[in-house]
Image: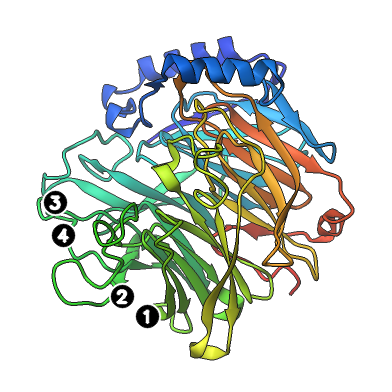
Amino acid sequence: MILFNVPRPRRRRLGVAAAAGGLLAALLTAAPAAATPDPGDAPPASKEMSKSAQAQAREAIAEGGIPAQDEIVHSDNIRHVAHVPKDALTGTNSDLAFQGRYAFAGNYDGFTIYDISNPKLPKTVSQVLCPGSQNDISVSGDLLFLSTDSSRSDSSCNSTTQPVTEKSSWEGMKVFDISNKRNPRYVAAVETACGSHTHSLVPEGKNVYVYVSSYSPNAAYPDCQPPHDGISVIKVPRKAPHRAAVVGFPVLFPGEGPDGGGNPGGPTNPGVSKTTGCHDITVLPSKDLAAGACMGDGILLSIKDPERPKVIDRVQDNVNFAFWHSATFNQRADKVVFTDELGGGGAATCNAEVGPDRGADGIYDVVGKGDKRKLVFRSYFKIPRHQADTENCVAHNGSLIPVKGKDLMVQAWYQGGVSVWDFTNSSKPKEIAYFERGPLSTDQLVTGGSWSAYYYNGYIYSNDMAKGFDVLKIDDRRTDPARWVKMRELNVQTQPDYFD
């Protein structure tokens, strides 16, 4: 592990590109070669667009249909109050977590801790180089959890890319002690079947349970064998995190044969992902509930026994959903918003050709009581602004904006930007605010945009894959009451009871 301690800034926030480049070069020159991020951890390569697509993008910009390259546009009720460009970690930015006056930002190369005590002037506290692909991130007390979903030579932060067919390869969960934010300390690693693409925390007093989501097994992978039809559950003792261990692998899609009982995908259901695990699970501990987005299936679970989550309902959408990606409960737990990551996050799906129902959110009411509750589809929501064919855009990570009696959400859409929308009427959702940048390129499909956009203690925080860390402020009578709701900790995939 390489820790980049960051001195108090002595330069202007918006003029750091040259200095950051020099810092990175110096640090990586001094570091062991093995610590340099590997090509296997890189996002999809840029894709050259056809001449007609390039011409259409330029025409749309000229006519004002989309913003110019890198231009920032937003609704009147949102302000862009701060931006921190990437520094020593140049990989793809990913998820966010929050605790007190700190934000924790994942990056394919490691993670960054920001001081957001003044949201208008966020400061980088520390950066940790620890390549591991997505590096999905969560925090609980003095512990930070980091997902590794690329085949590594070992569990260290100096590991290198290694073929997944090698039995000695490692993937799984890493645990850090963050009692000293300026000096995070790597304390534990737990290998899990098929690695850890994402994870969700279920805090239980002396222990933290971690639900590890991963997928895409293959008979040629020694540590990722089919059927991979469940999730790994890790138990982490808070006072002895080095004793963290897998305590179970609950099967969520029981069935006969090598593929389990999930959605079979194509050719039975053309264009739909075969269910071979879950992509993401959101837990609602106050209601003993969880919602799973599991490739070809959406599920509702009881987590009364956190070591043995139980599926109580399951739905599919074999018409408009390609890949069930993530889930969000409303405060009353009588609705779930599922996202469809059509195109895997690297495609342009926010255009007229794809339409309003694919690559969108699906809003489901939760009806009934106890273990007889059911998910009932109500409507789709997609941002109402078309994006260029050079912009990857699809429904991605978001959170509730806590307002009593209302169901409001802020959400990332990659290069579609950040959207704030209202699903109080689950059959008639509507956007109420937005923020976005123009395309990264008008010649190539370049992967970028907001990975996660979350509301925390009065501000919206966005981790832009290519650009860096953004802070937004929404001023709207519909969202203003949320300013009075203050959280001590927020992992969006462990939804809090905002009004307890």
Q: Secondary structure at mark 2?
A: loop
Asked if disc 3 and disc 4 are in contact, CB closer than 8 Å, the reply is: yes
Q: Which mark is residue 250?
A: 2
| Marked residue nearer the N-terminal end (3 or 1) | 3
Above or below, 234 against 162 in this view is below
Kindly identify which residue carries mark 1: 308
Kindly identify which residue carries mark 4: 225
Mark 1 or 4: the one toward you: 4
Distance from the alpha carbon under mark 4 to that under mark 2: 15 Å
- Residue 161 lies left or right of residue 376; in this view the side is left
| Marked residue nearer the N-terminal end (3 or 2) | 3
Asked if disc 2 and disc 1 are in contact, CB closer than 8 Å, the reply is: yes
Asked if disc 3 and disc 1 are in contact, CB closer than 8 Å, the reply is: no
Q: Amino acid at mark 1?
A: Arg
- Residue 347 lies left or right of residue 500; in this view the side is left
Report x, y in % for residue 361. Answer: 56, 56
Q: Secondary structure at mark 1?
A: loop
Visible residue check, residue 101: no
Residue 261 falls in image quadrant: bottom left
- Residue 261 lies left or right of residue 16; in this view the side is left
Distance from the alpha carbon under mark 3 to that under mark 1: 26 Å
Kindly identify which residue carries mark 3: 221
